Amino acid sequence: SNTFVSTPICCPSRTETISGRNFHNVKHGNENCMHVASQWNIFNNSQSWFQMFQRNGYKTGLFGKLVNNQASFWCNADTPSNAGFDRVNSPCNQANFYNTRWYEKYENGSWEQYTLNVSQSMYQTSYIGNASYKFLQKRLSDRQPFMM
């Protein structure tokens, strides 16, 4: 009934969980989210949760926000950082709930960036929820282990 978090704040907590490292081991002087080096701890870390689960036969999916500067890894990159991810559905600007620019990586390995026609009735949270639901439905129907 109790949950404990060593660093109860956004980027450091997510990075600690995904990398398995404590905050003093995920810091780097030049990063834009509380000095957390997401490139080295998440995207280029072969021991991150996503890469370890994927190597062990799990389908991995990421829906929504992973790190504050995720646009630099997917939306603004010539070659997106997809290591460890079978499926990605992520806004290029997670701070804008009616964001129209998205990055998608599909399970067949293809990826795209696109503009979404978002209305007041279909904002970011709904779009992410629908995509993650489809991923879960597929995992349940093919009875394959997953991590998202």
Image (cartoon, grey):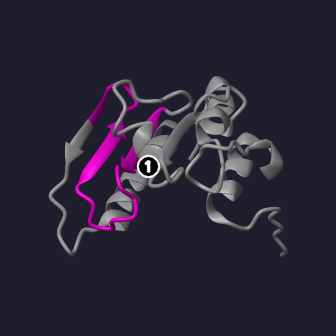
Q: Is residue 101 above or below residue 88?
A: below
Viewport quadrant of the N terminus? bottom right
Residue occupying image coordinates x 38% and y 46%: 89
Give the total number of marks visible in the rendering. Answer: 1
Residue 145 seen in this snapshot: no
Q: Residues within 10 Å of mark 1 (few under 14, many from 20)?
A: few
Measured as percent of width and height from the top left, residue 4 is found at 83, 67
- Residue 110 falls inside the magenta stretch: yes
**In the image, 80: left or right of 8?**
left
Nearer-the-camera pick, 28 or 103: 28
Eyeballing the image, is 21 above or below 77?
Answer: below
Residue 85 falls within the magenta-colored stretch: no
Query: Percent x, y for residue 84?
Result: 56, 30
Relative placement, left or right, of 112 versus 9 is: left
**Above or below for 86 versus 132:** above
Please tell me which residue is depicted at 77% across the width and 63% down the height of the picture. 7
Residue at x 64% of width, y 42% of height: 37
Q: Is residue 57 above or below residue 122?
A: above
Which stretch did the figure color magenta? 86-112
Residue 8: image quadrant is bottom right
- Where does the image place residue 65, in percent across and percent down from the top left? 48, 54
Relative placement, left or right, of 145 versus 123 is right
Inspect the image, locate mark 1, and give the three-letter code of the amino acid beneath it: Gln
- Give the left or right position of residue 29, taking residue 101 as reference: right
Q: Secondary structure at mark 1?
A: helix
Q: Is residue 56 visible?
A: yes
Q: For the point 58% across and 33% down, which residue is it?
A: 43
- Residue ID for mark 1: 137
